[in-house]
Image: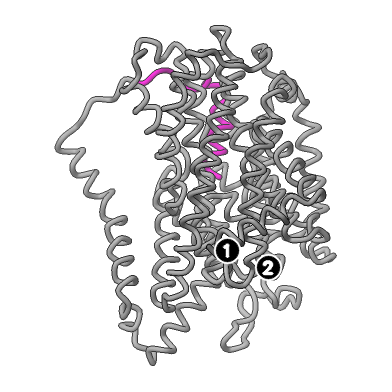
């Protein structure tokens, strides 16, 4: 009952004219960056972090949440109209969506994507309301050893799942942990890796790192692969759905939601796997199997619902445990820290109005996305014709301005350039950037929990295994590390034939997709 009261107060707060304005800005901005290949919600939130310092935390997070949800919707537009996913999670949508568009059914594909996103986002947010407070209440009963184990699980999962190889994921993670070490040791007071520079005593500002790696590195990488001609966009018309389209879409929406939410809540679960599973499921269950590969509406409805439900699932560990499971959640956690708010299990107790306002704004943002974006689909298609040089020049300008605004010191600009070039090199050599930013965020917190556990245990390393939850989590970590080896051995002895899978997004756009997958 308390949660319901808090949610009502959250709606009251989120429905103020100013917060509604920020919600509108967020969903429109999020859709725009989702539409444009090479720009994602993580990059946009990172860019906006410094410029929102003078905005109230609730308004800023409402806008960030709108950008996150809007980015999920916008990615489907380019997938359908251009066969170029704006987000890696929209790759599956392109398979059937673009075929529908080429067959003259772009309007129906966009409509089922938009309505499916609304349905999945609303159900996912309701599940967030039910589960996040319960997980948070359970988490506050855990001791330092258990919390340490859970954070290590997040690190292992993110490193193992992302990227083209586990080795590259580990290198990226180690880079992040090293950056997190810079500053004064909180226990001994000794400087670490400050190179005699007094401004580094407080550590490297995480906002500067996030803006550099996500925005500057990504802009430099995409700018290096600019195509001079804007792509040809299929005409849209006004999105609408016929009776048969509704009949064929509503079940895939629900099944996609069931796939997306739990995967989003898992560390590194992401949206790619549930969208793929949703596509396979719809292909098996559909009464129109012959249309798959030629433009089946079920192949758009299910994956798009899974995509948006996973976005809601991502917020469960982020709000209840302080654990980011994707790039946008990592940057949003950075925003909490920049506002002086400590993310973690006590967030619901210490900042209840802010958190419930954020959750209420998700319902409002979902509704705004449906109302604003369905009629605006032709406008989003025209956005794809924006000259890329102007776009990325603007991103570089705002990244530099934002980094300088953090502390008003030139050192931050030097750090921005350094980490921006690091981000570019990471993309060049196939290193995923998400483990780096998660290492920067979680590194200091893991160190604190480890030292606290050892202090309480009198320096005995066995004290790390004194709580049941910690033991279970360490077993899961061991299974995660061993499972790929077992799978490799099984595949070597029992090879399987490749599944029949229709053509994916256009090969000429693989750079954008690969780069988004790295993030």
Q: Is residue 16 magenta?
A: no
| Residue that lies at the very extreme toward the bottom in this rendered image | 458
In the displayed structure image, the side of residue 220 where residue 171 appears, left or right: left
When the figure is inspected, residue 73 is found, relative to residue 57, above or below; the finding is: above
Q: Which residue is mark 2?
A: 204
| Residue that lies at the very extreme toward the left in this rendered image | 493
When the figure is inspected, residue 262 is found, relative to residue 10, above or below; the finding is: above
| Residue that lies at the very extreme toward the top in this rendered image | 103
Q: Position of residue 129 (x, y in %)?
A: 52, 54
**Residue contact between numbered discs 1 and 2, judged by CB atoms under 8 Å:** yes
Near mark 1 (Cα within 10 A), the count class, few <14, some 14-19 or many ≥20, is many
Indicate which disc, 1 or 2, sits on the residue closer to the N terminus: 2
- Magenta stretch: dominant secondary structure: helix
The circle on residue 314 is none
Residue at 55% x, 65% y: name it: 2
Q: Which residue is mark 1?
A: 440
Q: Position of residue 449 (x, y in %)?
A: 48, 77
Residue at 62% x, 25% y: name it: 77
Q: Is residue 514 magenta?
A: yes
When the figure is inspected, residue 387 is found, relative to residue 161, above or below; the finding is: above
Q: Which residues are magenta?
A: 501-519
Secondary structure under tag 2 reads loop
């Amino acid at each position: 009952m308390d949660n319901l009261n808090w949610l009502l107060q959250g709606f009251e707060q989120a429905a103020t004219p100013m917060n509604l304005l920020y919600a509108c800005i967020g969903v429109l901005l999020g859709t725009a960056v989702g539409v444009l290949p090479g720009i994602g919600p993580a990059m946009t939130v990172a860019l906006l972090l410094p410029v929102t310092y003078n905005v109230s935390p609730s308004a800023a997070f409402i806008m960030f949440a709108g950008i996150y949800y809007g980015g999920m919707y916008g990615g489907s537009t380019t997938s359908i109209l251009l066969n170029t996913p704006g987000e890696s999670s929209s790759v599956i949508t392109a398979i059937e969506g673009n075929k529908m568009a080429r067959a003259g059914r772009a309007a129906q594909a966009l409509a089922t994507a938009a309505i499916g996103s609304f349905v999945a986002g609303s159900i996912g947010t309701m599940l967030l309301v039910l589960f996040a407070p319960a997980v948070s209440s359970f988490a506050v009963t855990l001791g330092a050893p258990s919390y340490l184990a859970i954070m290590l699980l997040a690190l292992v999962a993110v490193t193992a799942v992302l990227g083209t190889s586990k080795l590259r994921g580990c290198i990226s993670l180690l880079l992040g942990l090293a950056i997190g070490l810079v500053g004064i040791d909180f226990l001994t007071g000794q400087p670490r890796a400050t190179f005699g520079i007094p401004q580094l005593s407080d550590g490297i500002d995480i906002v500067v790192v996030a803006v550099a790696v996500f925005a500057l590195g990504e802009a430099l990488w995409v700018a290096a692969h600019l195509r001079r001609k804007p792509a040809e966009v299929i005409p849209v018309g006004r999105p609408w759905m016929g009776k048969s389209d509704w009949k064929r879409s509503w079940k895939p929406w629900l099944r996609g939601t069931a796939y997306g939410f739990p995967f989003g809540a898992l560390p590194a679960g992401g949206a790619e796997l549930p969208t793929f599973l949703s596509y396979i499921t719809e292909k098996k269950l559909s009464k129109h199997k012959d249309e798959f590969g030629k433009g089946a509406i079920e192949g758009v409805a299910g994956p798009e619902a899974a995509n948006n439900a996973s976005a809601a699932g991502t917020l469960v560990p982020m709000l209840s445990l302080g654990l980011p499971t994707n790039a946008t959640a990592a940057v949003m956690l950075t925003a909490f820290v920049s506002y002086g708010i400590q993310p973690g299990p006590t967030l619901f107790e210490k900042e209840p109005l802010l958190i419930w306002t954020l959750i209420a704004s998700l319902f409002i943002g979902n509704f705004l996305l449906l109302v604003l974006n369905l009629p605006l689909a032709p406008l989003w298609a025209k956005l794809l014709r924006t000259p890329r040089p102007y776009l990325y020049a603007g991103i570089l300008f705002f990244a530099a301005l934002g980094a300088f605004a953090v502390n008003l010191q030139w050192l931050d600009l030097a750090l921005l350039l350094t980490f921006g070039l690091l981000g570019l090199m990471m993309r060049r050599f196939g290193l995923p950037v998400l483990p780096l930013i998660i290492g920067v965020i979680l590194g200091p917190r893991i160190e604190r929990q480890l030292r606290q556990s050892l202090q309480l245990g009198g320096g005995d390393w066995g004290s790390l295994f004194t709580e049941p939850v910690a033991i279970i989590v360490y077993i899961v970590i061991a299974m995660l590390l061993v499972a790929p080896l077992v799978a490799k051995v099984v595949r070597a002895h029992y090879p399987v034939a490749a599944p029949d899978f229709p053509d994916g997004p256009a090969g000429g756009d693989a750079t954008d997709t690969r780069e988004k997958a790295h993030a």
